[in-house]
Amino acid sequence: MTESVIRVVGLGKSYETAAGLFPALKGVNLDIQPGEFVAIMGPSGSGKSTFMNLLGCLDTPTMGDFFLAGKNVAHMDKDALAILRNRTLGFVFQGFNLLPRMTLQDNVALPLVYAGVDKEMRRARARELLGKVGLGQYAESLPSRISGGQQQRVAIARALVNAPRLILADEPTGNLDSHTSEEIMRLFGELNAEGITIVLVTHEQEIAAHAKRQVKFLDGEIVSDLATDSLPFMAQRAGIPLGKGRAGDGMGAIGADAETHPLAEATKQPTKPPGNGGQVSAYPSLPLVPGDAAPAGHKEGGVPC
Ligand SMILES: Nc1ncnc2c1ncn2[C@@H]1O[C@H](COP(=O)(O)OP(=O)(O)OP(=O)(O)O)[C@@H](O)[C@H]1O
Ligand SMILES: [Mg+2]
């Protein structure tokens, strides 16, 4: 069996609050294989971001184990964890998180600065990735000059700069209109087709339908875990042939009750990863996001590329 990209066992997170410990995540088990495309769903406050922040090593669990690419992160020191995470995953945020006074090229290249990659290589890599997301001609522009959808493409390019095998995205289309959201989801689909594992939070069934697997949270627990193409009534409603693992639109009302629908239960089946292995980074250890371990003296807008 292939090594899981993500394996969590009894993973929990409790926050300290004025009213005492609040269990936002209550002992979750989940296994994600290389090449999967997983949508994390659930109502507001159900623990999705808490879970994603743990997967992205942006926060630490209060119980359980988390194996990232086979390594138990609980037993790693800070430096080893930074190396593992930066070689393994890229994170995309709802708010894009681009640095406003840096060109798009410099934003994309920023993680490479921390790794000591030389200027020419950084520039070439950033331009390559901006081209990949269809924004090569804007390399010298500032984020304010482009649309929200384009900014999210830049953020995806930045997440890809270290050739990660895993992309984590927390509501990446949350600030975008439906047409732009579809474009961003198509981009995620293309990256997944190249073998990158994608785990993405969304509130919207239409967005989740792009994924091959849908995991739903409620009150800090996983309450359903289904292959998208095991929900034939969703695909039929969207007029998409069964077995494609993707449905386009018009599923809001039905999709909301998908896991309680008797047909969903009747057709429930284990999800199957495509089996195309993850990629291994060709780049050295890199910080994940701007603000992570900025090199001494670094100032926003001041990174030469
Ligand atoms: N730092 C924190 N301190 C205390 N409670 C927190 C903290 N972060 C999150 N919570 C609580 O944990 C629960 C889960 O929050 P989380 O942000 O993971 O939900 P979510 O599913 O991502 O919601 P949304 O869809 O609104 O983004 C919520 O009740 C939230 O108020
Ligand atoms: Mg959230």
Image (cartoon, helix red, strand yellow):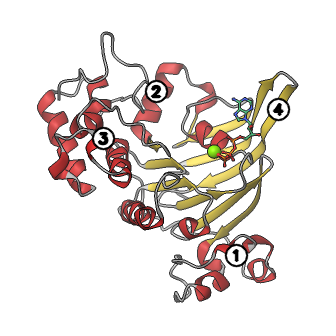
- Which of these two is toward me, 42 or 39? 42
Mark 4: C-beta under 8 Å from nearest atom of ligand 1: yes
Q: CA distance from mark 3 to mark 2?
A: 30 Å
> Going 15% across and 28% down the picture, which residue do you hit?
119
Q: Residues within 10 Å of mark 4 (few under 14, many from 20)?
A: few
Given the image, on which type of amino acid does mark 1 rest? Ala
Q: Quadrant of the N terminus?
A: bottom right
Q: Which residue is mark 1?
A: 253
Q: Counting residues from the N terminus, which is met first, the one under dot 1 or under dot 4?
A: 4
Q: Which residue is mark 3?
A: 144
Indicate the quadrant of ligand 2 in the picture.
Answer: top right
Q: Counting residues from the N terminus, which is met first, the one under dot 4 or under dot 3?
A: 4
Closer mark to the observer between disc 4 and disc 2: 4
Q: Counting residues from the N terminus, which is met first, the one under dot 1 or under dot 2?
A: 2
Q: Which residue is mark 4?
A: 22
Closer mark to the observer between disc 1 and disc 3: 3
Closer mark to the observer between disc 4 and disc 3: 3
Q: Is residue 12 left or right of residue 66?
A: right
Q: Counting residues from the N terminus, which is met first, the one under dot 4 or under dot 2?
A: 4
Given the image, on which type of amino acid does mark 2 rest? Ala
Closer mark to the observer between disc 1 and disc 2: 1
Q: CA distance from mark 4 to mark 3?
A: 39 Å
Q: Is residue 149 left or right of residue 302?
A: right
Q: Position of residue 180 (x, y in %)?
A: 40, 62
Q: Is residue 149 above or below residue 106?
A: below
Looking at the image, the residue that sits furthest to the front is 145
Q: Counting residues from the N terminus, which is met first, the one under dot 1 or under dot 3?
A: 3
Given the image, on which type of amino acid does mark 4 rest? Phe
Given the image, on which type of amino acid does mark 3 rest? Ser
Mark linked to residue 82: 2
Q: Is residue 163 visible?
A: no
